[in-house]
Image (cartoon, grey):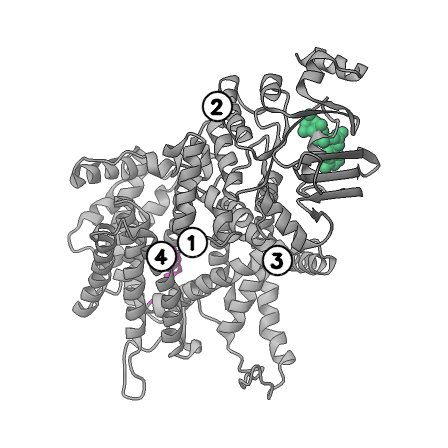
């Protein structure tokens, strides 16, 4: 496996940092240009003005009108980034209570911070347990923290953001260098997996302390994405197994489900979730004793279920491809050892099938992430919807371009991180070694 | 079922027939194998050798006839099947190691999930078995990091871990480079001397002559001729046997 044979670099961290920066950020002239432009944009977005004047120099530079020249000119010259800076809280949390708390309407932002700290700590610890010390992990995480640091404005927020970064770094170091960790690595990994599951439910509970009608912006987008992925993946695997089943009823049902869902656009399913659910659930209907009435049935829940059911059909098709790629001999060898069918699936067939299709699975997850922007049809306010809303405020009219560019950057950072994580996972699992 | 000399027939086949669609791959195989016996099967390609050996642990279901393994008849009874499979080890031409698991896990998987042994116990057994097949140092590698000969020896260790009474080998050296064939045959020779019942499909006639108690010559889904190695090398009776031997020797 590549990971095991990779030589351990002995050069000092600083040299490696310089080398990494050169190889990844300044490897070519276009690459350097993109890096400089991205940093400058971040700078402008962060501070909303140009106190030092460097960006002004970039703006007066005579950019060629080719390719992205016009766009670069706009970014540094024509654009007014104050729309992003002034509305930063709306992009991330929308109406989540609240930037201006009152006695009747207390500030609930602490819930987000607790979740962020929990996830930072877990992410750090997991990175420490599963990867060798790697600057890329740190850089990727810091890049992810940039949007969060847009909260910067009040000193407390700056401290809190820095705290989350420190939390990540500390748990990384703790998990990686704890004495005796090598001996208990397997146990520690199991504990970490357990902690992720617990963290998921804690985050769920914390978020549900606030009415989901008040969720919005990046928070809503990420909620739909994360829950959508976590729920649709096992469902998709079950559907794929069902489609490969020899029981005609199961096979027929799964095949029909997959083909039906794949023939309908997501926006239609979301629309049906909006319009038909109230018709199906009578006003006084109860589900497992809970008074879930049609009209009130949580819109976010409906959207999540719709996205999950939709995505599961595509995941099922990906996994089916993986199942077909596992050689017949693998099953025979396992059968010959006397393993039961369920164990053969769990230990031999599924791990190989899923590894074989990690790239297309992550592709599906990335499209799920982007597709969450369709929930506007249900009247929900996701990140993309916020981008439009903020420019309808007086004072920010006509700033759609800035707003959309900023939102596009956030989508790109997240989608790109997912894609890199997938490549990393592939390498770690040694898919290419067979 | 005890033969005259006191040994027990551990495999009994009576008129075993098998069809793939319209094509009849086995046309009535009748034979018995005594406990501790080493039987070598050879014959032309497509003669049904693999099909036959695979019916013995029901990787292929036979359509007619009877197969009894260590007193248990092979039929649709799943409980019987589990018992038989955990008593019959199989080694494949293509090794069929689990590529996503380490060598150690390849060997211990069935120990922990079929035999319900504790992990420490299974690990110890895995190391002991790798020692026996001559590659103790490979325990924490992945199959793709091993040579073909080493992989096949791991496959043998994996099958032996279940402490089978019978080992089936389907052309275990056919996918190997010539320089690796010997290391695998050496392990098999050692096993044969330890008294485990073995059925081996192979065309390695030197090895076969050394270890086999009996040869079965297959053609067109039938046992055409059967006898000791000496019989085949010195005095084969059937024309088809003579022709085939002249081609492979
Ligand atoms: N799953 C299958 N479906 C259809 N036909 C099959 C199947 N398996 C085997 N056969 C056919 O049955 C016949 C016997 O095959 P088998 O694999 O037992 O031959 P063999 O003696 O092992 O040959 P070889 O030396 O090439 O391995 C062949 O004609 C083969 O094409
Ligand atoms: Mg064969």
**Split into 4 quadrants, where in the image is the C terminus of chain B?**
top right
Q: Seen from this angle, which residue lies furthest front?
A: B5
* Marks 3 and 2 in Cβ contact (< 8 Å): no
- Residue B81 lies, with reference to residue A221, above or below; the image says above
Residue B241 in the image: state x and y as whole percent. Answer: 76, 17
Residue appearing at x 38%, y 58% in the figure: A407
Q: CA distance from mark 4 to mark 1?
A: 56 Å
Q: Please give the residue where the numbered disc 2 appears in the rendered image.
A: B183
Residue appearing at x 60%, y 53% in the figure: A341
Question: Is residue A407 highlighted in magenta?
Answer: yes
Q: CA distance from mark 2 to mark 4?
A: 64 Å
- Res B25 visible: no
Q: Is residue B55 left or right of residue A178?
A: right
SS state under label 3:
helix
Question: Is residue A379 highlighted in magenta?
Answer: no
Q: Please give the residue where the numbered disc 1 appears in the rendered image.
A: B118
User: Closer to us: mark 4 or mark 1?
Assistant: 1
Compare residues B195 and B134 and report the one nearer the observer: B195
Q: Which mark is residue A239?
A: 3
Question: What type of secondary structure mainly makes up the magenta span?
Answer: helix
The disc numbered 2 marks a residue on which chain? B
Circle 4 crowding by C-alpha within 10 Å: few under 14, some 14–19, many from 20:
many
- Residue A67 lies, with reference to residue A379, above or below; the image says above
Circle 1 crowding by C-alpha within 10 Å: few under 14, some 14–19, many from 20:
few
Q: Which residues are magenta?
A: A396-408
Answer with the quarter of the image where residue A147 lies: bottom left
Residue A394 in the image: state x and y as whole percent. Answer: 35, 71
């Amino acid at each position: 496996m590549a990971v095991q044979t990779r030589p351990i670099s002995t050069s000092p961290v600083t040299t490696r940092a310089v080398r990494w920066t050169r190889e990844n950020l300044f490897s070519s002239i276009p690459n350097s240009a993109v890096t400089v432009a991205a940093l400058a944009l971040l700078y402008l977005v962060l501070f909303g003005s140009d106190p030092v004047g460097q960006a002004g120099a970039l703006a007066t530079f005579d950019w060629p009108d080719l390719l992205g020249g016009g766009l670069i000119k706009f970014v540094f010259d024509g654009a007014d980034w104050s729309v992003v800076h002034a509305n930063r809280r709306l992009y991330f949390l929308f109406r989540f209570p609240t930037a201006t708390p009152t006695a009747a309407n207390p500030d609930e932002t602490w819930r987000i911070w607790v979740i962020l700290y929990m996830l930072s700590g877990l992410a750090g610890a997991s990175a420490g347990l599963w990867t060798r010390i790697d600057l890329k992990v740190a850089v990727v995480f810091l890049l992810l923290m940039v949007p969060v640091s847009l909260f910067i404005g009040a000193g407390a927020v700056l401290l809190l953001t820095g705290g989350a970064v420190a939390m990540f770094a500390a748990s990384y170091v703790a998990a990686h260098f704890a004495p005796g960790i090598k001996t208990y690595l397997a146990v520690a990994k199991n504990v970490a997996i357990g902690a992720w599951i617990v963290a998921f439910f804690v985050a769920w509970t914390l978020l549900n302390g606030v009415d989901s009608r008040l969720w919005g912006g990046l928070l809503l987008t990420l909620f739909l994405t994360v829950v959508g992925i976590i729920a649709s993946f096992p469902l998709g695997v079950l559907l794929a197994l069902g489609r490969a089943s020899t029981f005609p009823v199961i096979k027929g049902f799964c095949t029909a489900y997959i083909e039906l869902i794949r023939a309908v656009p997501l926006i239609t399913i979301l629309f049906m979730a909006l319009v038909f659910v109230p018709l199906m659930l009578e006003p006084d209907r109860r589900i497992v004793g809970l008074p879930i009435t049609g009209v009130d049935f949580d819109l976010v829940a409906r959207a999540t279920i719709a996205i999950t059911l939709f995505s599961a059909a595509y995941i099922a098709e990906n996994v089916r491809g993986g199942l077909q790629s596992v050689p017949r001999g693998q099953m025979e060898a396992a059968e010959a050892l006397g393993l039961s069918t369920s164990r053969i699936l769990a230990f031999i067939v599924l791990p190989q099938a899923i590894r074989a299709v990690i790239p297309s699975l992550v592709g599906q997850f990335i499209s799920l992430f982007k597709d969450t922007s369709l929930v506007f049809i249900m009247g929900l306010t996701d990140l993309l919807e916020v981008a439009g809303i903020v420019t309808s405020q007086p004072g920010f009219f006509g700033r759609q371009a800035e707003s959309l560019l900023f939102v596009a950057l956030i989508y790109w950072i997240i989608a790109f991180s997912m894609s890199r994580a997938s490549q990393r996972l592939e390498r770690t699992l040694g898919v290419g070694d067979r | 079922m005890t033969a005259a000399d006191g040994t027990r027939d551990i495999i009994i086949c009576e008129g075993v027939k098998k069809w793939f669609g319209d094509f009849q791959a086995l046309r009535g195989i009748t034979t018995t194998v005594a406990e501790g016996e080493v039987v070598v099967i050879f014959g032309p390609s497509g003669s049904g050798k693999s099909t036959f050996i695979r019916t013995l642990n029901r990787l292929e279901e036979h359509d007619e006839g009877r197969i009894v393994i260590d007193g248990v008849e092979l039929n649709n009874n799943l409980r019987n099947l589990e018992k038989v499979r955990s008593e019959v080890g199989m080694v494949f031409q293509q090794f069929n190691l689990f590529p996503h698991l380490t060598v150690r896990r390849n060997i211990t998987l069935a120990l922990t999930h079929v035999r319900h042994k504790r992990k420490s116990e299974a690990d110890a057994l895995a190391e002991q078995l790798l020692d026996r097949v001559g590659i103790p140092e490979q325990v924490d590698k992945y199959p793709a990091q091993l040579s073909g000969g080493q992989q096949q020896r791991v496959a043998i260790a994996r099958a032996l871990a279940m402490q089978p009474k019978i080992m089936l080998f389907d052309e275990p050296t056919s996918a190997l480079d010539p320089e690796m064939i010997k290391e695998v045959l050496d392990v098999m020779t050692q096993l044969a001397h330890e008294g485990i019942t073995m059925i081996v499909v192979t065309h390695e006639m030197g090895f076969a002559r050394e270890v086999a108690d009996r040869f079965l010559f297959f053609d067109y889904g039938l046992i055409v001729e059967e006898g000791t190695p000496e019989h085949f090398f010195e005095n084969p009776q059937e024309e088809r046997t003579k022709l085939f031997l002249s081609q492979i020797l």
